[in-house]
Image (cartoon, rainbow, N blue to C red):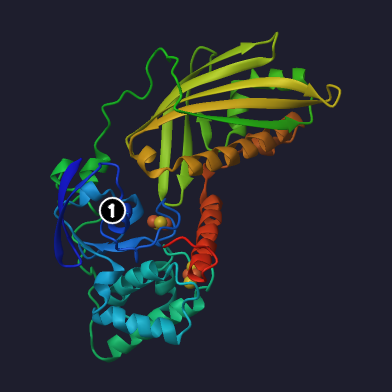
């Protein structure tokens, strides 16, 4: 546990927090400030936006411990704020909300725009609000509301503040924290990791999470097994994967790039490959790290090929085990990682099938695995759940 002193809505708060506790969880669970909503919990939807030292920040991907010494303002703290009062009236007038799930984050971001933008430029408002997603209202009313407040304030000769309190570029939240080890959060991000990207010998390990998946390809097992022996071909089927050296079974060096909204990780590492022709099975054991997020992963893929449809097709049984440590492990919920893995395997299976059929589209896979549609689906589910709770169809509290 770490002790933090944070000013929350102009009240001094001291508390003990786990290093892994997000600011959003701390505000909601420890301070009962449930106006800060959680949608994606991956920094994509903006529902959790609060002001951190006067600047909008996503509290779901900000650790509470990095806010030691900082000043936090949640939607509750903006009750008497002049701009927020004007925005709330404008949102009501312009029908800028339905379920209201996104609205706290929208208002916090909109307030920042009202302060900063010199005039009511619709394009600039749309760009400025693009980090806040709404799943039910649409954006016309929201943009009109923000536009009308900016126009009214500039009409009253209230000038824009171009930086609106920003002192530096980069992630907010750790500027005050002694525990962050640097006065400048950008330094912490840029600092090279001491971890070696991949050891010379790739060790066995016990995965903390194991996922079982199967898929079928319309090609006989012998052909599929031969393809699994071609490491470059297999890598070309994996979205976001690339080889960085000449592959050999005992060591394959490569990288995989994963993006979930603004969170982007580039895992560099190495793997060793084992296969058994008698049982048409094998395994790939790898280690990798993403220096930017200082996250490390170990992974093991076991596969077994089984004939189906009288040998005309192959069922590929996969067992995927992994352990993830570092910042991404704190941000990623296991359910989301599971869903991302499912998507990854589905895309891999499709690419493999096309490659086996001689379709070269699989040779140029997506530059990265992008989880954005997954996040949209999750956010949609949570907005529906929120509406159900509001309408009393579900007995649980917000
Ligand atoms: Fe934080 Fe979606 S919940 S950005
Ligand atoms: Fe935006 Fe419902 S009003 S998600």
Q: Is residue 349 above or below residue 74?
A: above
| Quarter of the image where the N terminus is located | top left
- Image quadrant of residue 7? bottom left
Which residue is depicted at the point 15% across and 65% down?
11
- Identify the residue at image location x=23%, y=70%: 164
Can you see residue 180? no
Question: In percent of the image, x 48 and y 26: which residue is there?
Answer: 254
8 vs 269, left or right, is: left
Foreground residue, 343 or 288?
A: 343
- Disc 1: residue Cβ within 8 A of ligand 1's nearest atom: no
Where residue 211 sits in the image (x, y, percent)? 55, 31
Please tell me whether residue 124 is drawn above or below residue 298 in the rendered image: below
- Per the image, the residue denoted by label 1 is 26
Picture layout, residue 46 above or below residue 219: below
Q: Is residue 279 left or right of residue 340?
A: right
Q: Residues within 10 Å of mark 1 (few under 14, many from 20)?
A: many
């Amino acid at each position: 546990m770490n002790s933090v002193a944070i000013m929350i809505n102009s009240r001094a708060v001291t508390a003990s927090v786990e290093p892994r506790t997000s600011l959003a969880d701390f505000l909601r669970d420890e301070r009962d400030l449930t106006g800060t909503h959680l949608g994606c919990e991956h920094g994509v939807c903006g529902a959790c936006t609060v002001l951190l030292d006067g600047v909008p920040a996503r509290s779901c991907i900000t650790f509470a411990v990095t806010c030691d010494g900082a000043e936090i303002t949640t939607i509750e703290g903006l009750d008497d704020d002049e701009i927020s009062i004007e925005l709330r009236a404008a949102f009501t007038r312009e029908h800028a909300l339905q379920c209201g799930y996104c609205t706290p984050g929208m208002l916090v971001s909109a307030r920042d725009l009202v302060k900063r933008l010199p005039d009511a430029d619709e394009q600039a408002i749309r760009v400025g609000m693009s980090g806040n997603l709404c799943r039910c209202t649409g954006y016309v009313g929201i943009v009109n509301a923000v536009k009308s407040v900016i126009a009214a304030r500039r009409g009253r000769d209230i000038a824009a503040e171009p930086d609106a309190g920003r002192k530096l570029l980069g992630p907010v939240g750790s500027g005050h924290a002694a525990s962050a080890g640097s006065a400048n959060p950008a330094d912490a991000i840029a600092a090279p990791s001491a971890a070696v990207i991949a050891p010379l010998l790739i060790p066995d390990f016990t995965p903390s999470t194991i996922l079982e998946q199967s898929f079928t390809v319309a090609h006989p097992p012998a052909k599929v097994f031969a393809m699994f022996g071609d490491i470059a071909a297999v890598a070309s089927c994996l979205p976001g994967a690339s080889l960085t050296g000449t592959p050999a079974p005992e060591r394959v060096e490569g990288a995989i790039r994963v993006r979930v909204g603004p969170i982007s990780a580039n895992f560099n590492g190495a793997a060793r490959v084992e296969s058994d022709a008698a049982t048409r099975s094998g395994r790939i054991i790898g280690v990798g790290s993403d220096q930017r997020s200082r996250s490390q992963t170990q992974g093991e893929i076991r596969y077994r090929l089984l004939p189906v449809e009288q040998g005309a097709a192959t069922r590929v049984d996969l067992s995927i085990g992994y352990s993830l440590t570092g910042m991404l492990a704190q941000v990623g919920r296991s359910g989301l990682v599971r869903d991302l893995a499912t998507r990854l395997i589905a895309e891999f299976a499709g690419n493999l099938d096309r490659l086996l059929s001689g379709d070269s589209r699989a040779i140029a896979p997506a530059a990265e695995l992008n989880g954005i549609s997954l996040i949209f689906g999750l956010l949609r589910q949570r907005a529906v759940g929120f509406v159900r709770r509001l309408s009393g169809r579900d007995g649980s509290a917000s």
